[in-house]
Amino acid sequence: MKFNKRGIFLRPFFRSGRFYNNIQEQDLVSRQSSLKTVMYLFESVFKEFMLFMRTRLTGRNHFPKDTNLWTTTSKIKDHSIEPIITWIGHSTFLIQINKINILTDPIFGSSTFLFPRILPPGVHPKDLPKIDYIIISHNHLDHMDEYSLLFLKKQNPDLHVLVPEGDQYWFKKRAFKNIYNSDWWLKHQFKNIDFTFLPALHWSQRNLLDRNKSLWGSWMIQTNSFTIYFAGDTAYSHHFKAIAKEFPQIDLALMPIGPCEPRKYMYDTHVNAEEAGEAFLDLKAQQFMPMHWGTFHFGTDSFETPIKRIQRWWKRNRSELKNKSLLIPKFGESITITKNLSHRFSQKQTATTL
């Protein structure tokens, strides 16, 4: 597989109030990216309409035929010492470990009216336990959702929020108490857990005027016995190998696998399923759990395309993946993670494998 030969960006480049992945990116972003984003938005909406019309005319549904295949209800514990991961949908996980409850990039509704939610959240926000920490990878609307965050603050007024540099002002305006802003490689150390903000190849924006005014990235979550990597949104690049050098033992990697298409728009900002697999190998992690698929129709993939592609990639690379595990949770499924969990598909998930 061939990838872009991108410049070194293990430290973010900052100029004139904006962040960039590298110094070469600055002029290109300032001249083209806002227009590119608008063009992609219009094209995505047009394709969404055409897919709807095709479904009406042909009867071929672009969305899941049987939602029960991908949804379940788990009994959520108040807390757990051993790691339990519950996929709520998109990039939102409830991580329970060391009697600590963590939420990643919480969103419980739709991203915008243009991109409604395909399946409901696997856990209703009212059914969540007390949340101790929220980690944010970047400020896109599908990762830093205002409604969800304000609800969580109301339910958990003393929660800690860890955000990329620049996003702390958004939280301060909304009266969040414990806010920790982060540059790449900055570690936040608490009593029973550490959070380190790490590189990603992406961008940030919440409106037409604030592109790249805040940083983006990934997170490493560490306890004395377990390490979890949360990749956020990212394109493929050498930062995965750099992270592996600093964190030689990663027990679980939460990796985005979609949207896979259209590749010409996604290539510079999002890994597809196969690139996520290559990044997993770069990280030298032990277990892979996919995210960022099946929740919003941001690309032209069918509902199960990213999952089918990561399953096929896994089978093609069995020799390199010996003693590693692919864990595919349903929406709302809680999985207890162990150090040496063998590769598995559930019975229903096997039925969707090509």
Image: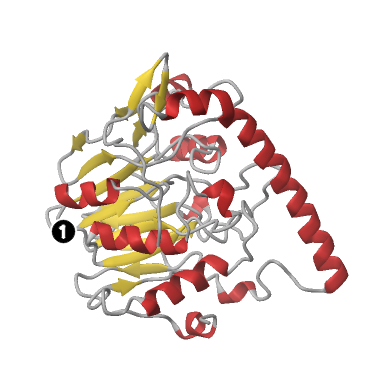
Q: x and y percent of residue 211 in the render?
A: 52, 26
Which residue occupies 68% across, 66% down?
A: 63
The residue nearer to you, when weighing 198 against 274, is 274
Residue closest to the far right = 57
The residue nearer to you, when weighing 147 against 304, is 304
Which residue occupies 51% across, 57% down?
A: 258
Residue 283's image quarter? bottom left
Residue closest to the far top = 16
314 versus 202 height, above or below: below
Relative side of 256 to 115, left or right: left
Relative side of 206 to 87, left or right: right
66 versus 85 height, above or below: below
277 versus 69 height, above or below: above
The residue nearer to you, when weighing 40 against 102, is 40
Residue 42's image quarter? top right
Which residue occupies 47% across, 45% down?
A: 106
The residue tagged 1 is 249
